Image (spheres, coloured by chain):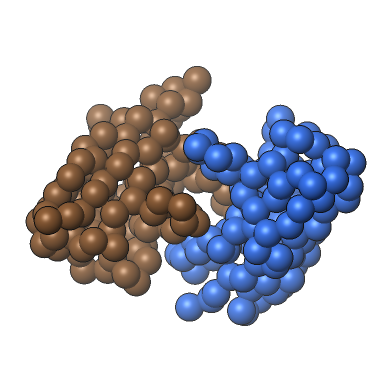
């Protein structure tokens, strides 16, 4: 069965960095686009970043451009999110999600990892 | 950038009622739209993709329609287990923006 397991969250001071990982299993990871979505406490969903199946194209929400970098290692079935220059407003649960196909939607989600940016 | 809005922001309905949620894009997005359900404390669940295609395993009381800028999610007969927040999401131009959500509860 498809599984996505995030890790790497924690408490970090403003301006510092954190790297999130998402370990994928149960499907051919290298065939799917992948995404990061975040949700602040009591707030809605915010798409953060995406990467094509082969890593050739990456997209970001404006608020993280230049600070966050999405990447993947298809040999290790792992998705990453490098977060630099963190701000208090980046505090959220971060989910990785699989894009099921062209115009398909995000059909599988991890359980999320909590990032708290605080001094 | 294309903005997504939803209405209403919340609603309360009785069991068995027909419920309709509207999602609007600030520019046309063809049918590049998905709907999700998120129950309290849970991970979002894909309900509808390509504006009107029901995801496998989703009850048939859920349906989606629309294209261009205006979309709707309909629950034909509201059930207690449908209490959740519902989000639309656009799928085009490398931006996957979610709507602000509509919270549905039972009257």
- From the top left corner, tell me how far across and down residue B52 is, in percent: 76, 52
Does B106 sit left or right of A99 as displayed? right
* Residue at 62%, 79% in the rendered image: B27
Q: Is residue A44 visible?
A: yes
Q: Residue extending furthest front? A: B107
Does B19 sit left or right of B34 as displayed? right
* Chain assigned brown: A
Q: Is residue A104 visible?
A: no
- From the top left corner, tell me how far across and down residue A50 is, in percent: 38, 54
Does A27 sit left or right of A104 as displayed? left
Number of disc labels: 0
- From the top left corner, tell me how far across and down residue B105 is, in percent: 71, 47
* Residue at 12%, 56% in the rendered image: A119
Image vertical order of residue A16 relative to residue B41, above or below: below
* Residue at 29%, 63% in the rendered image: A89
* Residue at 40%, 51% in the rendered image: A41
Q: Quadrant of residue A59?
A: bottom left
Q: Residue extending furthest top? A: A1
The residue lying toward the viewer, choosing from A82 and A39, is: A39
Q: Quadrant of residue A19?
A: top left
Does B64 sit left or right of A61 as displayed? right
- From the top left corner, tell me how far across and down residue B25 is, in percent: 63, 73
The residue lying toward the viewer, choosing from B42 and A2, is: B42
Q: Quadrant of residue B61?
A: top right
* Chain assigned blue: B
Image vertical order of residue A28 relative to residue B101, above or below: above
């Amino acid at each position: 069965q498809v599984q996505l397991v995030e890790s790497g969250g924690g408490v970090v001071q403003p301006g510092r960095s954190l790297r999130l990982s998402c370990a994928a299993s149960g499907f051919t990871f290298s065939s799917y686009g992948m995404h990061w979505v975040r949700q602040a406490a009591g707030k809605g969903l915010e798409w953060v970043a995406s990467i094509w199946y082969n890593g050739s194209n990456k997209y970001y929400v404006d608020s993280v451009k230049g600070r966050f970098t999405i990447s993947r290692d298809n040999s290790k079935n792992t998705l990453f999110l490098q977060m630099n220059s963190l701000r208090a407003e980046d505090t959220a649960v971060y989910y990785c999600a699989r894009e099921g196909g062209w115009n398909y939607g995000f059909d599988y989600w991890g359980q999320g990892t909590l990032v708290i940016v605080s001094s | 950038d294309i903005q997504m809005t939803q209405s209403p922001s919340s609603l309360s309905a009785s069991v068995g009622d027909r419920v309709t949620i509207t999602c609007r894009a600030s520019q046309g997005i063809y049918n590049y739209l998905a709907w999700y359900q998120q129950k309290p404390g849970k991970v979002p669940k894909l309900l509808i993709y390509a504006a009107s295609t029901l995801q496998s395993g989703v009850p048939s009381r859920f349906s989606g329609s629309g294209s261009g800028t205006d979309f709707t999610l309909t629950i034909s007969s509201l059930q207690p287990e449908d209490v959740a927040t519902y989000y639309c999401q656009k799928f085009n131009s490398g931006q996957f923006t979610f709507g602000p959500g509509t919270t549905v509860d039972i009257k």
